Every structure is written in C-alpha cells, then in structure tokens.
C-alpha cells in the first residue's frame, strides 16, 4: 500500500508539472537565435535541413510541455540530451526515436518519459535529428 501511495503521489506530481508547463511560449526558436548559438560552426544549425523539419514536428507535438532547449523542466533540456547522445549519431537515432514513441524511465532520473504512440518512427527520428543538432 505504501508503494502504491508513493506511485500515486509521483504520478500526480508529474501530471501537475505537465499541466503547469503546457505554455506555448517556447514553441519556436528563431533562426537568428539558432545562428547565434552556433557561431563556432561553419553552417548555422538553422540552415541544416533537419533543423526546420524537426522543429516543426516538435512544435506540433506536446514535447515542449516537458522539455526546453536550455533549461530543465519536467524532462531534461534538449541541449543536455544532444550533448549526451550526439557523439553516437547516426546509430543512436532509431533507438532514441523508439524511446520517444514507447516512453521509458531511468536514464534521466525517475521522472518517466511519456509514450507518444501516435508519432511515427520517421517523424520521431526527424525530431531526434533536430535535438542532436543543438549540441554545444
């Protein structure tokens, strides 16, 4: 019973975080901001073909309810995800896309990654490619 109560409190906390953070304020990252972030690269990430496509898919989804580019929210910031996994690309992309679709827990703490079964594998991979472009 004690385990059930802890789990119930955890789920209520996670749900309240989703509701509180469902603002649309951060749904777009301007092309100028992206260029500023990538001053050291030869080509600004906003000019990369995966950037616009991935950003558009993320903006249409509920991803920004739990994630921001540079600040932790319910889940890890996209930049931390990119810094952790970009070195493993392109091989890691299908695995991370499956994680988006199926959900999971444990990699970034005990807060679960909610499943997104309505997102196709191809769209999830495009979203992951966008996120990996944010590596610093």
Image (cartoon, rainbow, N blue to C red):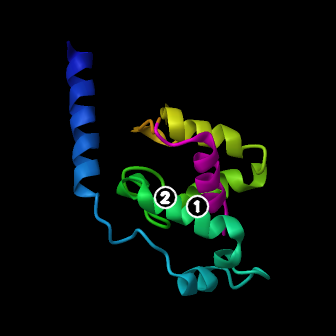
- Residue 12, visible in the rendered structure: yes
Q: Is residue 70 above or below residue 114?
A: below
Q: Is residue 77 above or below residue 85?
A: below
Quadrant of res 31 = bottom right
Left or right side of 22 for 67: right
Element type at mark 2: helix
Q: Please state the extent of the stretch shown in magenta in the rendering.
A: 118-136
Residue at horizontal 67 percent and vertical 80 percent from the top: 38
Query: How far from the left and from the top, in percent, is residue 19?
Result: 23, 51
Q: Which residue is mark 2?
A: 58
Query: How far from the left and from the top, in percent, is residue 83?
Result: 65, 58
Residues at badges 2 and 1 in contact (C-beta under 8 Å)? yes
Quadrant occupied by the N terminus: top left
Query: How far from the left and from the top, in percent, is residue 97?
Result: 61, 42
Q: Is residue 133 above or below residue 97?
A: below
Q: Does 84 lie within the magenta span?
A: no
Residue at horizontal 49 percent and vertical 75 percent from the top: 29
Quadrant of res 113 = top left
Q: Which residue is mark 1?
A: 54
Q: Nearer the viewer, residue 56 or 46?
A: 56
Residue at horizontal 25 percent and vertical 42 percent from the top: 15
Query: How far from the left and from the top, in percent, is residue 78?
Result: 53, 59
């Amino acid at each position: 019973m004690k385990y059930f109560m802890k789990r119930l409190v955890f789920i209520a906390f996670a749900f309240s975080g989703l509701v509180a953070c469902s603002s649309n304020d951060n749904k777009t990252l301007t092309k100028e901001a992206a260029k500023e972030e990538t001053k050291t690269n030869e080509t600004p990430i906003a000019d990369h073909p995966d950037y616009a496509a991935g950003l558009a898919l993320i903006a249409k989804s509920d991803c920004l309810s739990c994630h921001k580019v540079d600040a932790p929210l319910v889940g890890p910031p996209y930049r931390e995800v990119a810094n952790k996994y970009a070195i493993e690309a392109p091989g890691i992309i299908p695995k991370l896309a499956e994680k988006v679709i199926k959900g999971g827990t444990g990699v970034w703490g005990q807060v679960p990654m909610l499943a997104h079964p309505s997102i196709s594998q191809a769209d999830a991979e495009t979203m992951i490619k966008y996120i990996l472009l944010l590596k610093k």
